[in-house]
Image (tube, rainbow, N blue to C red):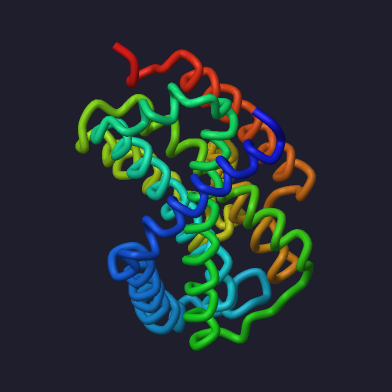
């Protein structure tokens, strides 16, 4: 395929993925906005008033970056896992695999769709957050780069889950029993400096902690983790998951019998 043909194939997959979730925005875009508003009302207003300041910021302001990042993580992941498994279930993924489109273009198309949904939801959640908090901006480049890198990482993770899934139940196991606990324990609602030494060390094994803290640095300029370490962890996971995903696609795991 020529470069122009590859670009056309990539653009077609991305447009399809975008239209897929935007057509059902009531199910894909609206719920995160409502959920975030509830978090602010419960954790920000009610509980936050009892907690007071954290790391020199109002508790409401402190949790904003984490809540935005949580929405980006869950929606990027959910978009790819549901879309790719849906293509397997409907047996239309075979049409892509037998076409001359390179597998890496197919993978990038699905990942870009996940990033698109994560971006749309992230923007909406940020707008909702502005009604509850005086949003600050410390470093726009850190903010945007961590935002995109995190969306890419969890889009790749969703692709892997979709490749291994054999039923619709399989696409909900990882988000429920792995992703949700890691997200809640990833420093969204607290600073790990509040934890005993053992649990501070144990928290460092949670990759989401690095994303949340790097994103918080972009907003507030504070982080429990070194920014360099956070970027190294995020980029390292992206590289590993990309090549693993591409390998699954090349082997046709879960697709070819």
Query: What residue do we see at 70% from left, 45% from top?
Result: 230
Instruction: Report the quarter where the N terminus lies.
Output: top right
Q: Is residue 109 left or right of residue 239?
A: left
Q: Quadrant of residue 5?
A: top right
Q: Nearer the viewer, residue 1 or 130?
A: 1
Q: Is residue 96 left or right of residue 108?
A: left
Residue 180: percent from left, percent from top: 37, 48
Q: Nearer the viewer, residue 182 or 14?
A: 14
Residue 184 at least partly seen: no
Query: What residue do we see at 51% from left, 60% from top?
Result: 188
Instruction: Report the quarter where the C terminus lies.
Output: top left
Question: Up-down: is 35 above or below 167?
Answer: below
Question: Up-down: is 85 above or below 138?
Answer: above
Residue 248: percent from left, percent from top: 47, 20
Q: Is residue 32 left or right of residue 167?
A: right
Q: Nearer the viewer, residue 139 or 14?
A: 14
Q: Quadrant of residue 35?
A: bottom left
Query: What residue do we see at 42% from left, 52% from top?
Result: 74
Residue 34 at least partly seen: yes
Question: Up-down: is 118 above or below 200?
Answer: below
Query: What residue do we see at 78% from left, 62% from top?
Result: 141
């Amino acid at each position: 395929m020529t470069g122009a043909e590859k670009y056309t194939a990539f653009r077609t997959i991305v447009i399809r993925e975008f239209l897929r979730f935007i057509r059902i925005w009531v199910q894909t875009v609206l719920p995160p906005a409502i959920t975030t508003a509830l978090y602010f009302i419960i954790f920000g207003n009610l509980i936050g008033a009892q907690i007071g300041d954290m790391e020199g910021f109002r508790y409401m302001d402190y949790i904003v970056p984490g809540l935005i990042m949580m929405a980006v993580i869950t929606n990027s992941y959910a978009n790819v896992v549901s879309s790719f498994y849906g293509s397997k279930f409907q047996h239309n993924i075979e049409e892509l695999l037998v076409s001359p489109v390179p597998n890496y273009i197919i993978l990038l198309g699905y990942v870009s769709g996940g990033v698109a949904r994560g971006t749309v939801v992230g923007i909406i959640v940020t707008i909702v957050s502005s009604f509850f908090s005086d949003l600050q901006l410390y470093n726009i480049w850190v903010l945007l780069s961590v935002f995109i890198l995190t969306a890419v990482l969890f889009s790749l993770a969703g692709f892997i889950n979709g490749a291994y899934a054999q039923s619709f139940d399989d696409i909900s196991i990882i988000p429920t029993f792995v992703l949700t606990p890691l997200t809640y324990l990833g420093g969204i609602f607290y600073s790990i400096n509040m934890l005993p030494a053992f649990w501070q060390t144990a928290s460092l094994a949670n990759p989401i902690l690095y994303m949340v803290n790097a994103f918080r640095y972009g907003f507030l300029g504070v982080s429990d983790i070194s920014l360099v370490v956070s970027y190294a962890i995020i980029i390292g996971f992206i590289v590993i998951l990309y090549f693993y995903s591409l390998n699954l696609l090349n082997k046709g795991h879960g697709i070819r019998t």
